[in-house]
Image (cartoon, grey):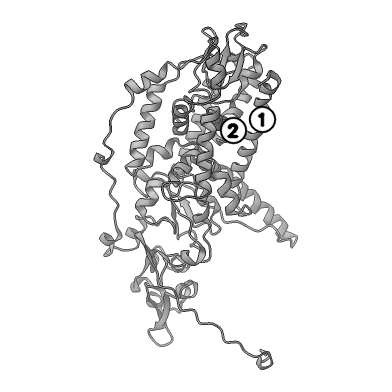
Amino acid sequence: MSRPKLTRLKNIRFVVSLVFFVLISLLFLDPWNKISPEFTNYVVALQLIPALLKILFYTGVTTIGLIFIILLTFAFGRVYCSTLCPIGTLQDIVIYLKRKINLRERFQYKKSPYIYHYLLFILLTIFTVAGSTTLLNLFEPFSNYGRILTNTAEPLIILTNNFISNILGDFQLYFVYVIPLRKISLDILAIPILFFALIVYMSYSQGRLFCNSLCPAGALLGLISRFSIFKIVINETACNECGACEKVCKANCIESETKRIDFASCIGCFNCIKSCPTSGVIYAGIKLRNASTSLVVFNSSRRNFFKYNIIPVAVTSLPVMSITDTIGIQRNGFQDARKHPISPPGSISIEHFKSLCTACHLCVTSCPTHVLYPTLFDYGIDGILQPKLNYDASFCNYDCNICTLICPSGAILPVDVPSKKLIQIGRTHFVKEDCVVIDKKKECAACAEHCPTKAVKMAPYEGKLKLPELNNDLCTGCGACEYACPTTPRKAIYVRRNSVHLQAIKPDVKKKEDVPEGLIEFPF
């Protein structure tokens, strides 16, 4: 490839990374739910770790996306890190701003911390295979970026939207409607903020250090890129030893003094090629590298990695976190039920959900009723930051299946609306003593009126008063009854989770009889 064409690589990379950065950001900043689940699926299918998890249980667009990423890396190295990863682009923005502040700032070659990076990667893999995503959730780039936007930027957008809506309402204009604002506790908010601060600090001080020391996607792609067809190499014949390439290398992987490139750490930004005043840095295929002994690729760490880091691990010997079932808490009340979070329809079971959810919070921001809430340790330490259904805030819409369609990791598998309507994520419980009908001697049928399957009906109690009567075979655990229940501080009717989701009976919906038009009487 000629030098003019090679220098265009940086421009192409810049445009692609910007497009994906904007697209992914929009997915998490759409409180109006204007972006279709299908479009979301196409975008998130190109996120490595979620796609890798999802392919264990589901094939589809995600499979194609994963194959594309692996083939892309085999062909061109870790260009994923510089184009498709949103955290990668976020780091580039910080680095760009830093260079605007300090024009003399230059990068310098540093040996990549392979031992620590791959040890962390091995630990993370072991934990994930054993069913705990704690480490994965802390370091996976896509999910961390999603949490930053969902918990910090999206609330600001909703507040702005509601402010505009109130002003327009004063002028009888209602095309901008008020959106419910999620309550986010400080402890949940602290983690994305700390991660954002870590990313800013690391990229500001040492470029792409996160990618080559903590990122699981970076570790995996670094391994694959060692076998890439095309690699950035130094042409010793053309190199004039000016060191320009090393000064602009954000991954600190170019050692200009020895004219070597640690390609496993290279994130494919192509800054080195564009900055080279000669043709000293080129993108070479296998044939060209083999044909010329003057082309140098530095890879001394490969032997060390296999020598010191690959250790036999018996994954099956690791203890798997136990899951508390609802059976053990049947005798307890409302507060006990709240201690056991309910996972969304399509997540099959709490164990399945915990083992695959990377807590990206895409389902949280996409949920139309805002019933999905991020948690801290509600699922235990091995389910850190994973979302649950919060019936204090809202309920699961009976006719909605959006969260099942957009989950990038397979923690929530796709189900169509008719199938979703029969998934029982929990069962309803009723405490007579807490019901306003008995406690206040007042009429109330809020739970029955809001139940979409008529699993809750009103039965005669005293005089004109009626009490709720349950048919849990029809109940899906959507929480509409609990959300509508007016009792405080605890609900008289509430949902206990099913650790393993069950099948509800299809409700018998009577068709309305068609009345001839001529027989319809005028109502008054």
Instruction: Name the quarter where the C terminus is drawn.
Output: bottom right
Determine which residue is flagged by label 2.
Answer: 83
Quarter of the image for residue 302 reads top left
Q: Which mark is residue 108?
A: none
Label 1: how many Cα within 10 Å (few below 14, some 14–19, many 20+): some
* Residue located 51% across and 42% down the image: 147
Tags 2 and 1 in contact by the CB under 8 Å rule? Answer: no
Horizontally, is 334 left or right of 206 in the view? left
Q: CA distance from mark 2 to mark 1?
A: 9 Å
**Image coords of residue 12 (percent x, y):** 66, 30
Quarter of the image for residue 7 reads top right
Q: Is residue 105 visible from the viewing direction of this image? A: no
**Image coords of residue 284 (percent x, y):** 58, 20
Q: Is residue 304 above or below residue 137?
A: above
**Image coords of residue 76 (percent x, y):** 55, 28
Q: Is residue 86 above or below residue 6?
A: below
Label 2: how many Cα within 10 Å (few below 14, some 14–19, many 20+): many
Q: Is residue 391 above or below residue 304?
A: below
Determine which residue is flagged by label 1.
Answer: 12
Horizontally, is 459 left or right of 104 in the view? left
Report the amino acid beneath label 1: Ile
* Residue located 45% across and 45% down the image: 359
Q: Earlier in the sequence, mark 2 or mark 1?
A: 1
- Between residue 12 and residue 371, name the one nearer to us: 12
